[in-house]
Amino acid sequence: MLSLVSRLDALNVRPGRLFIDGQWLDWPDARFDQLNPCTNEVMTSFAEAGTRGVALAVAAARKAFDAGPWPRMRAQDRKRLLQPIVERLYAAEDEIAQLQTLDNGIPYTFSRNSRVSAKAAADIFDHFLGWIDKINGETLPVFSSASNMQYMTFRDPVGVVAAILPYNGPVMTFAMKVAPALACGCTVVVKPSELTNLAVSRLAQILADSDLPPGVFNLVTGATETGTALTSHPDVDKVTFTGSPLVGEKITVASAPTMKRLSLELGGKSAALVFPDTRDVAATAQALMGLCSTFLSGQVCTTPSRAVVHRSIVDEFLHHARAQLRKVRFGDPFDPATTSAPMISRRHQARVLEYVDSGVALGATLLAGGGLPGGAIGNGNWVEPALFANVRNEMRIAQEEIFGPVLSVIPFDTEDEAVRIANDSEYGLAGCVYTTDVSRAFRVARAVKSGAIGVNGFASIPNAPFGGIKRSGVGREGGWSTIEAFTELKTINFNLDA
C-alpha cells in the first residue's frame, strides 16, 4: 500500500501550535489528527482553538489595531516590513509545495508549478504590497454656491479581519486574503480548513519570523467550533471566507448582529458553452475533461463541470473527452507521472459516488469512470473520473455542486438555448465560451449570468477582480476591488468660510 509518512521528518512536520499575539502557543486543550487523503495516514495533530483560543487571538488582533502602530504606520514603513515576505516565500516554495501535497493530495508537480503554488502566493503578496502607497481617496468638486464646503474621501483599514481558508488551495487563498488585509493596515486572524493545516502553518512561520508588531497576524486551527467562534465574535470587523455556500449562509447570519463586512467566495456549477465553430473540438474536449479529472480532480469552485455542447459536435466531443481519461494516473502524489488528487476525505468520496449513482438513476449515460480504483492505492480517497452523456440540465448532477471528477455533457441546438441552460443554475461564479466568432463570444459572455467568463479558456490573476453572483458569493478578490473590500470609505468635509 502507498505510504507517505516517511516524508514527515524531512519536512520537520511537528504537532501544530497556535500563533497569537506574536507568540507560538503549545495549546493544552483538545487536539485533532490531520489525515493525508492519498493514504488516510495521520500526518500530525493540530490544536482545536475553540472559543477560548479564538477569544485570545481576536483580543490580540483588536489590541494591535486599536492601540498598536500598524493601521497608523506610514505607507513606506509598512511596505518595508512586508516586502521581505515575498522573497521568503520564494525561498521556501519547494517546502511549501511538498506540505500542500501532504495536506490535500494535489500532485507535487501542480503544487509547485500552478496557480495554487507558493510561487503564485509570492506573486500575490508582491502585487498587493504594491498598493500600499497607492490607497487613496478623492477630492470632490464644490457642489453649489450655498456653502464653501470642500469634500474629500479617505480609505481607512476595515479593522480586525477573520480569514477562513478552503482545503483545495490553502497556499493561494492565504495570500489572497492575508496580503491585501495587511497591505491595507488591517490585523488578521487566519483559520485554515481543519483538513489542511500543514502548508498554512509554514506560511504562518514566515510571517511570525517577520518584524510585524504583535497581534497583527494570528493563526488559529480547528473545526466547526473554532470557525463559528471566529465568524460570530463581536470584535471581528470583517470575514473573508472561501468555501461552501452552506457555510457562507451561516457566516452571513452570524455576522448580522454586528454588520460585519463580508467577502464570500462560495460554490460554483460553471458551464462551458462549446459552439460548433470552436477552434479545435478535440483540444476543447480534452481541456474540459482534464479540468475535472486532473489537478485537484474537480475540487475547484471554478471547474466547468457542465459542458454545454452543440448537438452537431457532441459525439466528437465525447470521443475526445473519453480519450483524455486514458491519460489520468493515480498514485504517489510525488511521482511526476501522477496527474490527479484524491477526494479530500472518505466522507467526500462517498458523496461524489452518490452523485454518480444519482446520475445513472435519473437516466444519464455514464460513459466512463465513477468507480473506485482499488489496488495499491485502495487506502486513499480516489474516485475514477466520470463522464456523463445525455444529461438534462434539471438533473442533480447538472444542478448541484459535486466538487469532484464528474463532467456532465448537455447538448443544445441554438445560442439562446445554450445561454438559458448556463443561466438555469443557482450559482454564478465562472464559465467559458468556446467559439471563433468574436461577436458571438462577446454576446454570449455578456448574456451569461456569472461573475467571470473566459473566452476559449479561463484563468484568474491577482490584479483582476474575481467573485460570484447568486449563491456563488459576495464581493470580489483581485486588484483594486480587494483594496476596497479591506477598507472603509470615509468622507470629510471642510467649511472653508468658517
Image (cartoon, grey):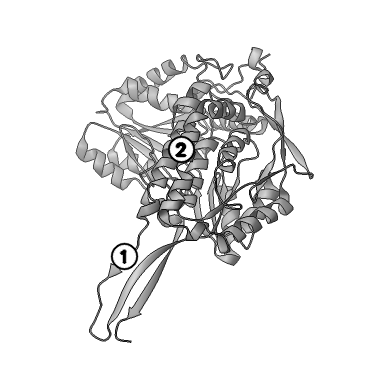
Considering depth in this image, is 17 or 330 the residue closer to the camera? 17
Query: Label 2, on which residue?
Result: 86
**Residues at discs 2 and 1 in contact (Cβ within 8 Å):** no
| Of the image marks 2 and 1, the number of the one nearer the N terminus | 2
Identified at 63% across, 48% down, the residue is 22
Identified at 33% across, 37% down, the residue is 454
Numbered disc in front, either 2 or 1: 2
Please say if 320 is above or below 424.
above
* Residue type at the position of mark 2: Val
Query: Label 1, on which residue?
Result: 138
Identified at 57% across, 53% down, the residue is 249
- From the image, which quarter does the C terminus lie in? bottom left
Q: Is residue 295 among what the camera can see?
A: no
Please say if 391 is above or below 466.
above
Q: CA distance from mark 2 to mark 1?
A: 30 Å
Identified at 21% across, 34% down, the residue is 437
